[in-house]
Image (cartoon, helix red, strand yellow):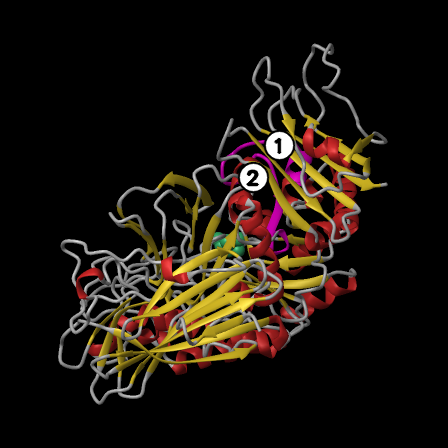
Amino acid sequence: MSIIFNEQERSFTLSNGRISYVMQLFLEGYLGHLYFGRTLKHFNIKRAFYQTEREGAPNPELHADARTFSLDVLPQEYAIYGSGDYRIPALEATLSNGTTTLDLRYKSHEIFAGKKPLQGLPASFVNADSEADTLEITMQEVGGELEVVLSYTIFNDLDVIARSARIKNVGNGNVYLRKAASLSLDLPSTDFDRVSMYGKHAFERNVERVPLGHGIAIDSSTRGATSHQHQNFLALCEHNADEFHGEVYACGLVWSGNFEAATEVSPYGNTRMVMGINGFDFKWELKPSDSFTTPEALLVFTQDGFNGMSQNFHGFVQKHLVRGEHRDALRPVLVNSWEAAYMDFNEDSIVNFAKDAVKLGAELIVLDDGWFGVRDKDNCSLGDWTILNAKKLPNGLKGLADRIHALGSKFGLWVEPEMVSPDSELFRAHPDWALGVPNHVRSQQRNQYVLDLSRQEVRDYVVDAICKVLGSADIDYVKWDMNRNLTDIGSATLPASQQQEVATRFVLGTYDIMERITKAFPHILFESCAGGGRRFDLGMIYYMPQVWTSDNTDEVCRQRIQYGTSYVFPPITMGCHVSACPNHQVGRSTPMLSRFVCAMSGNFGYEMDLGKLSPEEQEEVKGHIALYKELRPTIQKGKFFRLMSPFEGTKNETSWQFVSQDGSEVIFMYFKNECLPQGNIRKVRLTALDPNATYKVTKHLFTPSLAVNALDYLSNYNLEGDVFGGDELMEFGLNMDKVDRDFAAHLLVFKRQ
Ligand code: GLA
């Protein structure tokens, strides 16, 4: 058993042989946090907490140690407000008498094998009870109105601890939660860098690293979704941690709505991390006997730097979060109609588009937006899913799907179920089905409103309509989009006391419809999307095994977007497509090969009309698709390592690497965007190879040099057939000195000999 309660010490230890997490009950049942880190064989917990009198730190009454014990200093497991701790709390509530002071004490605990699901929420799971153990500690609020069950699951195979909290009203009056975080974690150090991600539409998940200073730092979303601007991920690392070395504590939230990721550095040498649903504009009514379950937070600890962190997240996502038959299946090469045709298409034009793509090796043709209602522009018809656009699809979806299948390809479709256009039959019939606030004109984004998915009848309509569509033709794939943030957050049916629940209920409603629709169509491969990467989060991945990473398909921007995304998500989850040049988002033109090397580093496809390419380009694309299919098992199922960050160093180069499950194949990618004169020496060191083995280069593709000066022997040097030592590649590295053009890329495939 990896969870032990030591009765004498009143301590809990969770351990999987590599990491340990230790807690202790203090005085009359305060739950303190003692340790999270590498597994300890021995731990004299008597000396674990430095207890001393501190001026200004309140002491609980009725205790001999009174003046040396304060919640303001105690490292805690689930911090509360009002009884002595002035740091950011995990839980805030207004009790039935209107007061807000909370005081949580231990009541009982339970340890069991496996893990329970979280009602109505996405959450990690075990495939067999032997994969994890769970500890549930029940804390009681001393006033007698609330009970809080803190849940901890430690996994045997990966260094992840899953935490969540369930808050129950055990009193007789209404209690209002003002904040209910998934976790708080107090670490006994302040020497950390804080690593988070920021972004915007078409430029998501930029990695930012800053030294942690005193006081509070918060990253949060109030947009109703995880958002393009923020990512519900936070890491604290040692100042000298890098991709390969150093301690990293990381947390990802299995949630897709408003969130808060906060840190507070105390003057006494502690750092607190709190993560969960955003307490801003949140109020949840708990009637007697009601419970509220927080989303789950995944905690990772590693001493192997950021790649070590990502190995844990990647393995965990694939094994304990992604569900369904597509989890372990290789994903098809898809070609999507969006940038090729936008909404200007008909059955014949899509069939022609498909013919060209299938000829070059495409396996899945996706019809994007514009196929339903009267939608020729983005200003109408969302919600009218069952109204066929007979002008574009005279034979319905079935007619088109059958023709695509006859070409030997799978067929996929775009939908945006959470939204409604003001100009739609649905909105005209049910104007109160959109989120809205009395006496306010709703704001629009992309000419659309958000459906009030807190309402059962609205959810039932959406499930029914989408299921009708998906059942009307042979559909193999669905791209589920969500193209705006929430505003005017009000529901026509909830009472005033519950209006601040709506943003959270919208996300829970989305989860409900996703659960029902994906369950009804288990064979369909679902890809989530939200204007690109607005909702690339651990919540979505539970329902849909892949995500459209960003609307930006420019190869240079994509290096950063994919690099940041890979902190938490494995490449098999990332939709990455080659698109036409000049690029539709930034106007840049980059070589086809560079676009391919970047897009093939994930779940590969095209976002363009391949029929418009020259015969030479088509041959090139055909070769790329064939090569991707050959390398796909390593890319989709192997291990991924980042080697050079576009956010650090020259910020002009990026490199990463894949290693197949059995270690026999290694795929190396290197990008250099801007060519500068007299380039520096550049050695890129690979990782995770066998130092005793040799590796032969079986493929070397690179953008040819454009320099007139041919004196440079490395510029056009093909390494195919060359043999390198595993130790050589890891210690000396690969020489990438000379690049004589902008937007250069190298792809090397090694086979272990
Ligand atoms: C969003 C998606 C795009 C495309 C359009 C269609 O922006 O991210 O890929 O599907 O919607 O309207």
Decide if residue 318 is on the left or right side of residue 419. Answer: right
Residue at 14% over, 53% down: 55
User: Residue 355, relative to residue 326: is it above or below?
Assistant: above
Q: Nearer the viewer, residue 711 or 74?
A: 74
Q: Are marks 2 and 1 in contact (CB under 8 Å)?
A: yes
Looking at the image, tell me whether mark 2 or mark 1 is earlier in sequence order.
2
Quadrant, the C terminus: top right
Decide if residue 289 is on the left or right side of residue 701. Answer: left
User: Residue 260, relative to residue 640: is it above or below?
Assistant: below
Label 1 sits on residue: 671
Label 2 sits on residue: 559
User: Element type at marker 2?
Assistant: helix
Q: Position of residue 598 (x, y in %)?
A: 63, 40
Q: Which quarter of the picture shows residue 379?
A: bottom left
Q: Residue flagged by tag 2: what amino acid is it?
A: Gln
Mark 2–mark 1 Cα distance, whole angstroms, equals 8 Å
Within 10 angstroms of label 1, few (less than 14), some, or many (20 or more) residues? many
Q: Residue flagged by tag 1: what amino acid is it?
A: Phe
